[in-house]
Image (tube, rainbow, N blue to C red):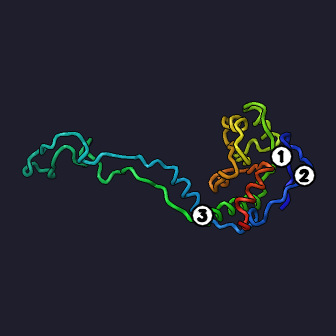
Amino acid sequence: MELAVYNIKGEETGRNVSLNESIFGVKPNDHAIYLDVKQYLANKRQGTHKTKERSEVVGSTKKIKRQKGTGTARAGDIKSPIFRGGGRTFGPRPRDYSFKLNKKVKKLARLSALSYKAKADKIRVVEDFNLEAPRTKDYAEFLSNLKVNSEKTLLVLNEQNNNIYLSSRNLPGAKIITAPELNTYDIMNASVLLLAESSVDVLDNMLSNRK
């Protein structure tokens, strides 16, 4: 698959980049994508939710009324879950939501997500660039030149670039990531995938079937 390379002004440079068919042209596996996205979101959960059960509530343990003769149901102490301010029955406790996923499944999920974007023509390749200083206006102009300023974009760089990152973080729907950090969730969550020219080779080395 051949894609034109654009510059920061949104103009074609006259160069083309060939995308590896074994990465951007595989048959997508929806279940692999589902599992990888599920793991990504599960691993981000803190799992610190907690409610008090009746044994943890502070209060009197005195029986609040006699057992019989009241015409109402039997009741123990005020910490019972049926009373306001009492403990909660089977409430949530701190837990770890993360789970493991086979590396081959994760790789298949990323390949599937990239192939979906390629098939939908939602990938743009831009030549490597740098911003002189962190300016949101400059990055917004870059997106406008590519005519993707109204889209949710993910720019994939070959390495960290602080100026580009700081210029983009105040823009809603704009995200920057490096090629080694690329994951299925971010690919699927973006409307348009922007690949820095040098990041294509990094992805090829990471995900190629030759490895």
Relative to the observer, which residue lies in front, 100 or 154?
100
Q: Which residue is mark 2?
A: 15
Task: Judge left or right: residue 10 versus residue 45.
Answer: right
Instruction: Tell me which numbered mark, 2 or 3, is placed earlier along the sequence.
Output: 2
Q: Please give the name of the residue rendered at 16% of the width and 52% of the height, measured from the top-left corner.
A: 73
Amino acid type of disc 1? Glu
Dividing the picture into quarters, in which one does residue 16 lie? bottom right
SS of the residue at dot 2? strand
Q: Amino acid at mark 3?
A: Lys
Q: Quarter of the image for the C terminus: give it.
A: bottom right
Residue at numbered disc 3: 103
Residue at x 84%, y 59% (from the top left corner): 18
Q: Do the residues under discs 2 and 1 have CB atoms within 8 angstroms?
A: yes
Q: Secondary structure at mark 1?
A: loop
Q: Residue at x 49, y 56 (%)?
A: 98
Question: Mark 1 — residue?
Answer: 127
Q: Secondary structure at mark 3?
A: helix
Inter-mark Cα distance, 3 to 1: 31 Å
Whether tag 2 and tag 3 are in contact, CB under 8 A, the answer is no
